[in-house]
Amino acid sequence: MKKKKILVIMHESLVPPDSIEGLDQRVVDEWRTEFDVVTHLKAAGHDVRCLGVYDRLSDLKETIREWKPSIVFNLLEEFDGLVNQDHHVVSFLELLKQPYTGCNPRGLMLSRDKVLTKQLLSYHRIPSPQFAVFQKGKRIQLPSRLRYPLFVKSATDDASLGIAQASICHDPQSLQQRIEFVHSQTSSDALVEEYIEGREIYVGVLGNDRLTTLPIWELKFGTLVEGSAPIATRRVKWDRRYQARHGIYTQAAENLPDAVVAELHRLTRRICRALHLTGYARVDFRVRADGRVFALEANANPILSQEEVFARSARLAGLGYDALLARILSLGEKYQATWRVGGV
């Protein structure tokens, strides 16, 4: 692969050091993706610079103007502390006519907005849990059309923020309390969905116009299924000690009927097209015991560290980590941004 000048942008607190030797694993976990991407790009011979971004785009503009990178590798997941504002940074890159990796602005905006995602899935008749939205600051009118148990989460925050066992509600009293909790603790609207009992399934995808789905992955909840509802709380996703204690891990999904496998791949492609996702993405599902599939959410630019779900799934498909990064770079270079389509 031709050597490139690559500007890697990330949150300003996640710029990694050159080495992790002697560092506590919990510290490394904070910027593991950034470290893996940067070190592997450098090892591949690319000229790599890191730029931390918080709430100023002037530094980004100046760096691009002076250094003239071949491509920007986008690892930002928020802007000015807001997870649903990172699409503005990508729009800024397009205004600068600067090639970048990952999802386009429209896809980022649609997928980051959980309520809009649900509405679009419903419009396209893609199976997803029935839902209702409760706006912060407005009177709570409990729904009569939704069936308990119900699952309550923030309409905007990600990384399972605010999700706990109490997020599953079995009666109006607990539902009202949890909605009020989400309003006060996350300062966002509350999204209430019918809870789907079943297997937690993830499907990765690569591509712009032509989409390639990756092997299906599953989150195994270990001993949690014995006494608690199997849901992806913050501790389940990120707390290594908690994972070890309960035997929580992810692996390639096993023993799924062929019809379910085909449906998961088909729905993943439909969802990515409905939400205008490009580059790389991951779609999360629940599969009930009767084989019915329900889409939960879509994640543009999912976590890209070497041992997380997306990279492991790609590796099972024969795409090692270095090859995966090269594919993501290639997709970024080939994406037909508005300024390219017109031949400018």
Image (cartoon, rainbow, N blue to C red):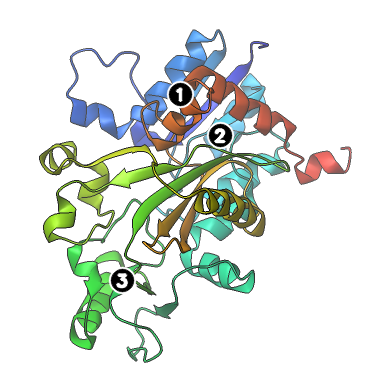
Q: Nearer the viewer, mark 1 or mark 3?
A: 3
- The disc, 1 or 3, on the residue closer to the chain's N-terminal end is 1
Q: Tell me the residue at 13%/56% (across/down).
A: 226
Residue 334 x, y percent position in the rendering: 74, 32
Asked if the residues shown at circle 3 and circle 2 are in contact, with their CB atoms under 8 angstroms apart, the answer is: no
* Figure check: 317 above or below 272: above
Q: How dense is the environment of label 1, judged by Cα within 10 Å: few (below 14), some, or many (20 and up)? A: many
* Figure check: 280 above or below 26: below
- The mark found on residue 139 in the picture is none
Which quadrant would the C terminus be assigned to in this image? top right
- CA distance separating discs 1 and 2: 19 Å
- The disc, 3 or 2, on the residue closer to the chain's N-terminal end is 2
Residue 291 x, y percent position in the rendering: 44, 60
Q: How dense is the environment of label 2, judged by Cα within 10 Å: few (below 14), some, or many (20 and up)? A: some
Q: Secondary structure at mark 3?
A: strand
**Residue 52 visible, this orientation:** no
Q: Tell me the residue at 41%/58% (across/down).
A: 287
Q: Nearer the viewer, mark 3 or mark 2?
A: 3
Q: Label 1 sits on what residue type?
A: Val
Could you tell whether 74 is left or right of 176 in the image?
A: right
Q: Residue 286's quadrant in the figure?
A: bottom left
Q: Label 3 sits on what residue type?
A: Val
Q: Tell me the residue at 39%/42% (across/down).
A: 253
Q: Tell me the residue at 53%/22% (across/down).
A: 318
Could you tell whether 88 is left or right of 114 in the image?
A: right
- The mark found on residue 37 in the picture is 1
- CA distance separating discs 1 and 3: 34 Å
Q: Secondary structure at mark 1?
A: helix
- The mark found on residue 60 in the picture is 2
- The mark found on residue 152 in the picture is 3
- The disc, 1 or 2, on the residue closer to the chain's N-terminal end is 1
* Figure check: 175 above or below 267: below
